[in-house]
Image (cartoon, grey):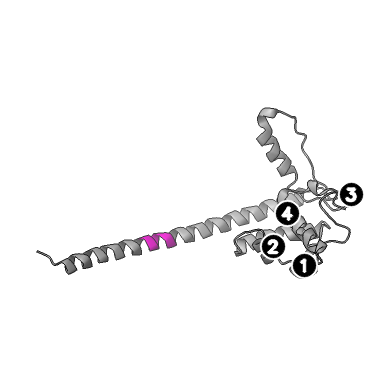
Amino acid sequence: MPSVVGLLEQHELAARRRVDGLREEADRIQAELAAAELEWQEWAIARRRVDTVLAPDDGATVEAEVIPDPRNAEVQSTLRDAAKSQVPVWRQGLAWSALSADYQHILKTLADRARLHQGPLTCQEMAAMFGMDVVPARVEALRSKAKRLVARGWLAEQQPGRFTLAAGVTGPGDGS
């Protein structure tokens, strides 16, 4: 008859092996997730590049005509968001509603900081303010959006990596 200590050691060894096996599986899944996220980011970058190449020269967005149909409200919302996925060139009087929600969120945050006479923000600071995980993928996604807003005249980047509203761009009411 085995001793109690011997039985405990056997159960401890079995538990240790199970933990080690699960850790190896978790590491494998984590590596697979990282690879899939990298692939997703590459496709997102490629899509943005295609959008840029296919955009009209003046930077205006091309909006598809959407026929109202109450049964397809969700589809219409998705189509409107897709039409807003391009950032139009800022001009006096252009409303913030011309931008998608993500871009509006960035502008609102920077407008609040300007109103409070606070300085520019980095993308890492924005990610933390938005409650996002401050990881390279999230920060780079914000940086891409901020750079696009700079290129289209909505934001200014007076110091590398530090963003603020461009001159003339004010609150969300009318965008000018």
- The numbered mark, 4 or 1, whose residue comes first in the sequence reads 4
- Bin the neighbour count of mark 4 within 10 Å (Cα to Cα): few under 14, some 14-19, many 20 and up: some
Does residue 111 sit above or below 83 in this rendering?
A: below
- The numbered mark, 2 or 3, whose residue comes first in the sequence reads 3
Q: Position of residue 69 (x, y in %)?
A: 71, 28
The residue sitting at the front extreme is: 116
- The numbered mark, 3 or 1, whose residue comes first in the sequence reads 3
What stretch of residues is rendered in magenta?
22-27
- Spatial CA distance of label 4 from label 2 is 10 Å
Q: Residue 120, labelled with which disc?
A: 1
- Spatial CA distance of label 3 from label 1 is 23 Å
Question: Which amino acid type is marked by label 4?
Answer: His
Q: Residue 126, labelled with which disc?
A: 2
Tags 3 and 4 in contact by the CB under 8 Å rule? no
The residue sitting at the bottom extreme is: 159
- Spatial CA distance of label 2 from label 1 is 10 Å
